[in-house]
Amino acid sequence: MGKIIRIGALISGSGTNLQAIIDSCESGKIDGKIVFIGSDNQDAQGLERGRRYKIPTFVVDYASIIRGFKKRPEEAMLPDDFDLSDLLPKQSLLIKKGDLEKAKTFITTRAIAEKELLDKMKPYPFDLLVLAGFMRNLTPYFIDRVNTDPDNPRIMNIHPAILPAFPGCDGYGDTFRYGCKAGGCTVHFIDYGEDTGPIIGQRVFQIYDDDTLESIKEKGLKLEWELYPECINLFAQRRLKTIKIEHAVKNGKKRERTVVKILPQN
Ligand code: GAR
């Protein structure tokens, strides 16, 4: 077994996934150690969990950064290495959804917050960054500064739906309202899109007529607490490899997709 990995975590809320990861590190189910917990929300309950285990914590107040920018954009302190013309095309999905001005404001405000996040993460070198209920989209500004080797992504996320169905901020709600007969959760690497990155693992549960949104969330979270530590440990064992696969589709066209291959255990 190689050396244990250093894991950084970002959270926004209750941090039950974070707790599952902490427990798995403590029990040896993950060959890893959490080296920091960052949040965009100073009231995140998960921060308290970290403090209990003497894990360094910090907060970047996204909401006030965004408010401040909207009030006085001329006073914004942009990162020195901020280049909107490089970032905008990378997050083209956002531009398709809304107008260009909105996309510019989105990327600019998030990059200001992300620069602060990167500064606060700096004292704690890490091998893997896990998003554990972090409810902020990351921009290419942040992603490129963490994923310095494009062949070895190192930001993981857990999402409360069977991707690619129901990306966004309410996976279980969307699953329930759609009338799905199965729901689930997905762990994936982050790319520039919204919940579009290469899938590492998924778990599925049945939905019955008497299920409610609450019971669906309960079933889903239980699976999340198993799946996330398993995927993190695959990373720790260096068993996750991203590869580009090309498929022939209709009209002689080809489509390329980066997927995760899970390597066998040594
Ligand atoms: C989890 O259900 C997680 O999948 C979801 O937030 C919840 C966090 O719970 N994440 C997202 O929706 C990300 N887009 P937790 O704070 O108790 O771990």
Image (cartoon, rainbow, N blue to C red):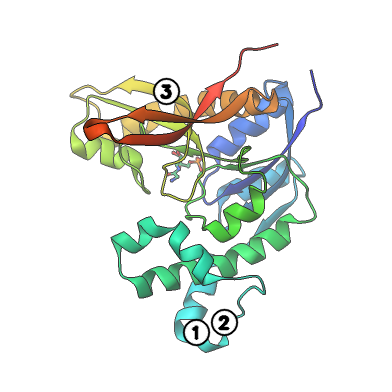
Mark 3 or mark 1, whichever is nearer to me: 1
Name the quadrant containing residue 31.
top right
- Which residue is denoted by mark 3 in the rendering? 203
Residues at marks 3 and 2, CA–CA distance in whole angstroms: 43 Å
Name the quadrant containing residue 80.
bottom right
Residue drawn at 30 percent across, 36 percent down: 165
Nearer to the camera, 196 or 242: 242
Q: Is residue 168 left or right of residue 226?
A: left
Q: Mark 1 falls on what kind of element? A: helix
- Kindly indicate whether the residue at mark 1 contacts the one at mark 2 (C-beta within 8 angstroms): yes
- Which residue is denoted by mark 2 in the rendering? 76
- How far across and down, in percent of the image, does residue 168 sit? 36, 48
- Which residue is denoted by mark 1 in the rendering? 73
Q: Amino acid at mark 2?
A: Ala
Q: Mark 3 falls on what kind of element? A: strand
Q: Is residue 114 left or right of residue 102?
A: right
Residues at marks 3 and 1, CA–CA distance in whole angstroms: 44 Å
Residue drawn at 45 percent across, 29 percent down: 245
- Kindly indicate whether the residue at mark 2 contacts the one at mark 3 (C-beta within 8 angstroms): no
Name the quadrant containing residue 220.
top left
Tag of residue 106: none
- How far across and down, in percent of the image, does residue 43 sit? 56, 57
Q: Amino acid at mark 3?
A: Arg
Residue drawn at 50 percent across, 84 percent down: 73
Work out which quarter of the rendered image holds the C terminus and state it.
top right
User: Looking at the picture, does residue 144 appear above or below residue 195?
Assistant: below
Whether residue 41 is visible, yes or no, is: no
